[in-house]
Image (cartoon, rainbow, N blue to C red):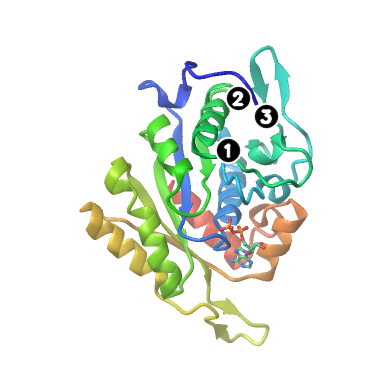
Amino acid sequence: LRGGPGKEIPFAQPQSRTRVYAIASGKGGVGKSTVTVNLAAALAARGLAVGVLDADVYGFSIPRMLGVTGKPTRVGDMILPPVAHGVKVISVGMFVDGNVPVVWRGPMLHRALQQFLADVYWGDLDVLLLDLPPGTGDIAISTAQLIPTAEILVVTTPQAAAAEVAERAGSIVNQTRQRIVGVVENMSAMTLPDGTRLELFGSGGGESVAASLGRLTGTTVPLLGQIPLEIGLRTAGDSGLPLVLSEPASPAAQALQGVADEL
Ligand code: ADP
């Protein structure tokens, strides 16, 4: 990565028609990236022009989940993103050698995000999904500064402890004045082969986060979907073919389509 500040970010221009969603969570491992890739694939399959920017600097996993093996190519001063399942993809992971950890600090992260937004040739997107790192860190603040119109989609599990942290992550909008588009509860009750419902991570987290973020912002924050725990959702992520494409009739894929309907 190189270059400097000063270039315009097309998505931040008043005439931009691209809807930008920043996918946020309180903690890692709640399925933020899984939700992001499935929403991206679902929207692209509907004929929308979709981009995903994996800004989860410490836990980037989007390229694997979308089966992207190609690297971005440089044409003049633009970076062309690889495309997978009709989705343009850029990840921090594409700019590091091997599986080394990224040890950038705030200002470097801000510059990297700025560059991903300004120097990548995204074209005329309908939707850009930004996979944020968990928590309320530098990247979330930078996103708000660089694209104030970005809307926040909060992902939580049903567990009370996870929900509390997700609320904290969502409450960043108190400072940034961004809109929260809704909450997705992931890892909701799973159905066992004998038909029993198992609430492995409890219940109520999604409702609770939506209600408290609604109170906080004085708006209605909807719970957009409850995605069940499903083995296929994990294996789909590992194989690089999102579940909404590989097993569209599965309950988790249906729930994810339901969230995509609301965006
Ligand atoms: P995050 O981006 O929040 O760190 P990931 O999307 O990487 O979380 O998900 C963490 C792990 O849980 C991954 O291995 C993923 O495949 C798995 N996973 C996520 N959601 C589900 C689900 N609903 N059912 C089964 N496995 C899931």
For marks 1 and 2, give the CA distance: 10 Å
- Which residue is tagged 1? 53
Give coordinates of residue 239: x percent, y percent: 77, 55
* Residue 1, quarter of the rendered image: top right
Cβ of mark 1 under 8 Å from ligand 1: the answer is no
Sequence-first tag of 2 and 3:
3
Cβ of mark 3 under 8 Å from ligand 1: the answer is no
The amino acid type found where label 1 is placed reads Leu
- Which residue is tagged 2? 120
The amino acid type found where label 3 is placed reads Pro
The extreme left residue here reads 218
Number of residues whose C-alpha sits closer than 10 Å to that of mark 3, classed few (under 14), some (14–19) or many (20 or more): many
For marks 3 and 1, give the CA distance: 10 Å
* Residue 143, quarter of the rendered image: top left
Number of residues whose C-alpha sits closer than 10 Å to that of mark 2, classed few (under 14), some (14–19) or many (20 or more): many
Q: Are marks 2 and 3 in contact (CB under 8 Å)?
A: yes
**Can you tell me which quadrant of the image ligand 1 is in?**
bottom right
- Which residue is tagged 3? 81
The amino acid type found where label 2 is placed reads Val
Q: Residue at x 27, y 48 (%)?
A: 174
